Image: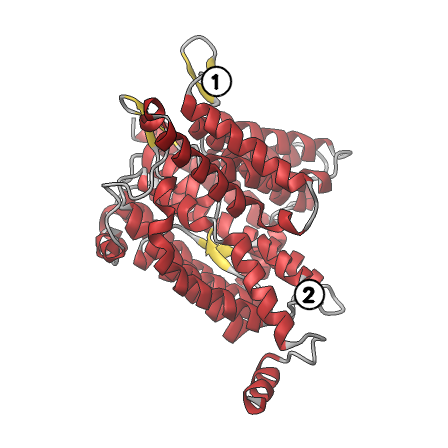
């Protein structure tokens, strides 16, 4: 036993970083419990595209396991990884529903973005791209994605619905399914407000309690059964269904790349993953003492490579972009400082495949012909979105151009129902506003190139292809 402890201590530099094996194990368990909600939430969201719920659930767990193991064993970072919230909404609602791509083609786009991310991670291009995009615009994109997925969550909860007169309006708050959604929303924010240890696991606790309440209500009151979640749905299939998504990305590469819109989609996948990961790693690295004197991440390239590898693996097995989770800070608060904690996260995600039947109550409920609500998982989207909006506090509100481009990015992301369109408008407006002022030299040429590419994309989409 002592030899094993010595080996672990030496490999992960546990003592060197001021930690202990017990702290790392507890930290890994804490991180896993804080982010395991992604399994049912991601499966429910991507299954709306026609993908198998069971296949996505398994693919999400496998990709999270492999990526977290690479992060722990190779990069030695206390960071868990899984399919990213926000980018999975882009996958479903923009790429598949909005632009009309097949889910197989969306997976192919994720695969290509992962390969590009890998190339960026091992070359000097990483710093060039990061330095080209201004801090305010990066923060605006993060906040915009937060508003976007919160809007989707409210829609999936039935709290917000469509209206011919006002476009959107309040849903039927008297409907049992909507009321269950409201209960989940109140519960998740209520637990978070406690600011105690339980708040670290707010989402997974809220999903479990909301699902249980719904199942019990359906069992006790037969008249509510059709409006409530159930355990052991008839259409869930099994984990073996991963064959329905495994490798499908490769077969769709040809049809994807033949569509001019694909390149904007690939860029957006890459952009969101790249900066979401970079921001998370800097935040986690700061808390874990993994920044050098210049404020740069120690072995940051290895951490980015682990993220890129996770995205590639995820696309192959059948899930959306894999990214580093900010929930990893919960483990750092528990004392985790090394990759041993991330290794624990990876192993637990493998074990989680056995828990699949327990999450059968998270599926969508058809409340009327063609109208589906997700009362158990909708609150997770709203809650995560609310947390992402906090990045607005770091924007320079005294800079008029920063304010304007932030507003354009966020409002267009929400109203166009597209993360990609919001990013495009934000980049274009920022570049033009800077170009027509005496501040044009503050902008990197790379930024002008990116804005020009977005303009070309709009021209192709709305003028050439019409």
Q: Is residue 14 above or below residue 301?
A: below
On the image, the x and y values in percent for residue 377 come to 45, 38
The N terminus - image quarter: bottom right
Residue in the picture at 66% in, 62% down: 332
The residue lying furthest to the bottom in this view is 3
Q: Mark 2 vs mark 1: which is more N-terminal? A: 1
Which residue lies under the disc numbered 1? Answer: 173
On the image, the x and y values in percent for residue 190 come to 63, 36
On the image, the x and y values in percent for residue 3 come to 56, 91
Which residue lies under the disc numbered 2? Answer: 288
The residue lying furthest to the front in this view is 220
Q: Is residue 289 above or below residue 323?
A: below
Residue in the picture at 50% in, 64% down: 345
Image quarter for residue 231?
top left
The residue lying furthest to the top in this view is 165
Image quarter for residue 322?
bottom left
Q: Is residue 156 left or right of residue 437?
A: left
Q: Is residue 164 above or below residue 250?
A: above
Mark 2 against mark 1, which lies toward the viewer?
1
Residue 403 vs residue 339, the one in the foreground: 339
């Amino acid at each position: 036993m002592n030899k094993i402890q010595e080996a672990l201590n030496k490999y992960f530099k546990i003592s060197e970083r001021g930690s202990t094996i017990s702290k790392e194990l507890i930290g890994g368990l804490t991180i896993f419990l804080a982010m395991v909600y992604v399994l049912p939430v991601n499966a429910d969201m991507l299954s709306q595209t026609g993908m198998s719920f069971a296949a996505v659930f398994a693919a999400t767990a496998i990709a999270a396991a492999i990526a977290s193991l690479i992060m722990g064993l190779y990069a030695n970072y206390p960071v868990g990884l899984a399919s990213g919230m926000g980018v999975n909404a882009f996958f479903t609602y923009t790429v598949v529903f909005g632009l009309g791509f097949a889910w197989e083609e969306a997976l192919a786009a994720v695969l290509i973005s992962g390969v590009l991310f890998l190339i960026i991670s091992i070359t000097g291009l990483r710093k060039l791209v990061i330095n080209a995009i201004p801090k305010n615009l990066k923060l605006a994109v993060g906040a915009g994605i937060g508003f976007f997925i919160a809007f989707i969550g409210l829609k999936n909860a039935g709290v917000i619905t469509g209206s011919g007169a006002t476009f959107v309006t309040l849903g039927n708050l008297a409907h049992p399914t909507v009321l269950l959604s409201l209960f989940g929303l109140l519960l998740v924010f209520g637990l978070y407000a406690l600011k105690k240890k339980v708040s670290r696991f707010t989402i997974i606790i809220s999903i479990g309690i909301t699902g249980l309440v719904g199942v019990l209500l359906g069992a006790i009151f037969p008249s509510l059964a059709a409006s409530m979640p159930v355990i052991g749905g008839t259409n869930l299939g099994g984990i073996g269904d991963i064959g329905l998504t495994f490798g499908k990305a490769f077969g769709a590469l040809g049809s994807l790349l033949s569509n001019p819109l694909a390149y904007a989609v690939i860029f957006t996948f890459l952009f969101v993953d790249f900066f979401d990961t970079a921001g998370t790693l800097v935040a986690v690295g700061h808390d874990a003492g993994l920044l050098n004197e210049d404020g740069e991440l120690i072995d940051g390239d290895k951490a980015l490579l682990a993220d890129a590898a996770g995205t590639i693996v995820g696309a192959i097995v059948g899930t959306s972009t894999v990214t580093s989770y900010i929930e990893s800070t919960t483990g750092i608060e528990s004392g985790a400082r090394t990759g041993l904690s991330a290794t624990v996260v990876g192993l637990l995600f493998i074990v989680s495949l056995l828990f699949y039947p327990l999450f059968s109550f998270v599926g969508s409920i058809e409340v009327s012909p063609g109208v589906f609500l997700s009362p158990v998982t909708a609150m997770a989207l709203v809650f995560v979105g609310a947390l992402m909006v906090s990045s607005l506090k770091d924007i320079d509100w005294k800079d008029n151009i920063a304010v304007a481009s932030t507003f354009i990015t966020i409002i267009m992301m929400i109203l166009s129902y597209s993360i990609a369109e919001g990013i495009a408008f934000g980049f274009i407006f920022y570049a033009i506003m800077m170009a027509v002022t005496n501040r044009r030299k503050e902008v990197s040429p790379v930024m002008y190139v990116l804005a020009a590419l977005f303009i070309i994309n709009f021209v192709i989409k709305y003028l050439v292809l019409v």
